[in-house]
Amino acid sequence: MKIVTYLSGKELRAGLRCGGDRILDIATVFGRAQDAGLVAASMMPPTSVLDIVSGGPTMSQACNDVLSAVKANDLDFVGVKAVDATLVAPIPRPTKNVFCVGSNYRAHVTEASRAQEKQYKVPKLPVFFTKPPTAVVGPNQSVLMDPAVSEKMDYEVELAVIIGTPGRNINAANAINHIFGFSIANDVTARDLQRAHGGQYLKGKGLDTSCPFGPEIVTLDELANFENLRISLSVNGELRQDGNTKDMIFSIPRLIESLSLGLTLEPGDILITGTPSGVGYAMEPPQWLQDGDVVTCEIEGIGTLTNTIQNTGSSQSA
């Protein structure tokens, strides 16, 4: 399945891609499927993507049954044309901080060493940090840039993993059973803040709107080759990053194993898994994001995530 969250008027609705050109209103059609006896009457219709993710295999199967029934014309389509849909982040407000991984592609570690004139080594364990829920924005939404806060905004395309089955101390060999699906994220980073605050990640990585996420979640069954996907990013049409998820230093199962050690992962948790080489600060000369720049992230099998940089011109608090 390919799952989205979209706006219907002022209301957020969970939707399933139906044939690529339509988005099915899953809550409404789910209820009709129950009336028709196609789905167990005891199940609560999902009203959000989190409902689908947390509902486990039974909910996923029910949603697949509804989707199949619509495609077979056993149920009327209720939803919107994909071209008319206003998508937001698939999980608009994560229940936790987004888990992030640094230094997970060898070529990126190499370029970081050169750009910072430091002797970096490939980490022996994954480097984890987080972004707050307020950092998350959806496709085609603005990434806000305030020069009074940061003058060195950068980009990082990343494969996002969405946890489906909860667990703690998860073994790498079993980690795939805890994955619900995948999406795209852009780890927008204020490099000057990152350096100014002792090199720690949170301040430079946690600004509002600094985590574009979407446009949809593709379930594991549709993206079984997640460890061999082309991953790229362009700015104003210029290709900047071009890599492959097979080049990760720590595989996704290994990341889940390490992250879950003594830390419970829950349905809907998001883990973004590092970026390939080509970031702006490592270019010669460095290329920082500017007002009006259009940044497009693309991952094979998932699609594209596009956002525009917007200079707010003010750092005043609301």
Image (cartoon, rainbow, N blue to C red):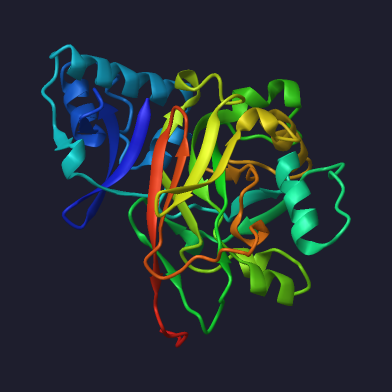
Please identify the quarter of the rendering in which residue 195 is found.
bottom right
**Label total for image:** 0
Q: Is residue 20 above or below residue 260?
A: above
- The reply, left or right, for residue 28 in relation to residue 90 is left
At 16% from the left edge and 35% from the top edge, which residue is drawn?
79
At 40% from the left edge and 54% from the top edge, which residue is drawn?
236
Please identify the quarter of the rendering in which residue 313 is found.
bottom left
Residue 219, given in percent of the width and then of the height, sits at 45, 27
Q: List the single residue furthest toward the bottom.
A: 316
- The reply, left or right, for residue 256 in relation to residue 217 is right
Q: In this view, does 312 lie above or below 154?
A: below
- The reply, left or right, for residue 20 in relation to residue 170 is left
Residue 224, given in percent of the width and then of the height, sits at 54, 19
Query: Quarter holding the C terminus?
Result: bottom left
At 14% from the left edge and 19% from the top edge, which residue is drawn?
75
Residue nearer the viewer, 119 or 50: 119
Q: Can residue 215 be seen in this view?
A: no
Q: Can residue 275 be seen in this view?
A: yes
Residue nearer the viewer, 156 or 256: 156
Please identify the quarter of the rendering in which residue 27 is found.
top left
Residue 89, given in percent of the width and then of the height, sits at 39, 49
- The reply, left or right, for residue 47 in relation to residue 73 is right
Q: List the single residue furthest toward the front.
A: 284
